[in-house]
Image (tube, rainbow, N blue to C red):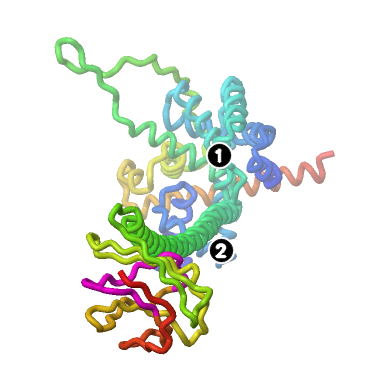
Amino acid sequence: MKMMDKKKIIEDGILEQYILGELHPSDERYIEQLLASDPELKQHFDTLEADFETLGLENAVVPPPMVKNELLSRATALKSEGVKQPTASKASRFKFYFAVAASFSALFLATSIWLYSQLNKLESDVKMVETEKQDLKKELNQLSESYDTTAKLYATLSHPDTKQYVLEGNTLMPQGKVISFVNHDLKSVVINTERLPELDEAHNYQMWADVEGEMIDMGVIDTSQSLVAMNYIDASESLNITIEPRGGSEHPTVERLVTNVYL
Amino acid sequence: MQDDSTLISRLQQRDEQALSALYDKYSGAIYGVILKMTKDETRAKDLLQETFITVWEKSYQYDPKKGRFYTWVYRIAKNKVLNFLRKPVKLIQTDDFSVYKQKEAPISFEAEHLELKGALTTLKEHHKTAIEMVYFKGLTHREAHEEMGVPLGTFKSYVRQALKELRASYGKMMLLIMFLIIYGI
């Protein structure tokens, strides 16, 4: 509806059409706004409405009582069904829907935070499991290495052709001795280090094979193990042990020979 | 006119007694309108009941700032009747493929329901007809002016004039009533 002045609205019967419900809803809203802001027009409108009502009441026809009885029993039934929330004003319904929406948002937010924390926890769990797995793998490798070593040692020790030689300590090592097990078929040498006296941090025992007058390195003896495999050297005539600076030497320090045995 | 605001707010609180009281007050006027529009008592009774069921169910939609309670109920009733009248006639197909209008209970209607009463009867014929068309037959201003065969502007002035005369008549009535109240005893 175009902007209309008061006079035009009154002369065009717009208010009558409004009361009779003939106007388009958008025009109705326009008229409602006008009426709310113009007391004079509102007064004119009130008079018209009152007249229409009087007109209706003057032409009233009393309906049969049955209609009222049915109406009231239906009304009671509808009320007890609680189909509608009639007293809820628009504002309070809005509040209600807003509250519902807000609750869902809050719930959603809480759930998200919880899920996020769970995700973080899972990630750290996965990392922990990964680390544990690595540790276990390392341990397994060590175990299987140790098993291989032990199996080799055992193979040497249990072999029927293995020969046992005892290296008694000389005057430099009167209390000490080393048991050696030599197998020429397996080409292996295993020694028992239990009776080797402990050395200071700066020194190791080192084993040598004598091949035609030449001392060949068989390795530094790891005294932390009781049974140690040494390098097998072909055509060895004797086994010799010297005390060497930590880490071993290329040539034996003959002055510090502690024990030897001829094969 | 007694103030309805207490009854209406009780109605909006789903108070059946308020519904009952408002029904007593307005059902006659609304029934009069429905009867004149439908010219069918059986339908009119149903439509009156449906109107007040809607009043009961949608009472929260009524806003006193926008107008009188009676106007609100009148518009609900008018919409229900117009929707009913606009429904297509039910047709029944018979065995020989011809189509008949569905047989319904014979329409009962007393002609006196169509008679206009009160101050309206004192108006000039064309003023009375104009009011009757828009108020009791549910025609729009546009439909009514065509029905009467006069230009829309003329028709609008008929309505306005008719209401002016009614107003004057009601004003006299009010003066008379007040006179009786003040000096009656």
For label 1, the crowd category at 10 Å Cα-Cα, with few meaning under 14, some 14 to 19 and many 20 or more, is few
Q: Looking at this rendering, what residue extends furthest in the right direction?
A: B185
Residue B68 left/right relative to A150: right
Q: Are marks 1 and 2 in contact (CB under 8 Å)?
A: no
The location of residue B152, given as percent across then percent down, is 34, 52
Residue type highlighted by circle 2: Ala
On the image, which quarter does residue A225 sit in? bottom left
The location of residue B113, given as percent across then percent down, is 49, 26
Looking at the rendered structure, the secondary structure element under dot 1 is loop
Magenta span of residues: A223-241
- Using the image as rendered, state which of residue A145 and residue A51 is in the foreground: A145
On the image, which quarter does residue B109 sit in? top left
List the residue tagged with mark 2.
A36
Looking at the rendered structure, the secondary structure element under dot 2 is helix
Looking at the rendering, in which quadrant would you find the N terminus of chain B?
Answer: top right
Q: Looking at this rendering, what residue extends furthest in the top direction?
A: B95
| Residue at screen point 35% across, 16% down | B104
Chain bearing tag 2 is A
User: Eyeballing the image, is A162 above or below A225?
Assistant: above
Residue type highlighted by circle 1: Lys
List the residue tagged with mark 1.
A84
User: Eyeballing the image, is B33 above or below B170?
Assistant: above
- Using the image as rendered, state which of residue A256 and residue A130 is in the foreground: A256
Mark closer to the observer (1, 2): 1
User: Eyeballing the image, is B127 above or below A209?
Assistant: above
Identify the mark nearer the N-term, 1 or 2.
2
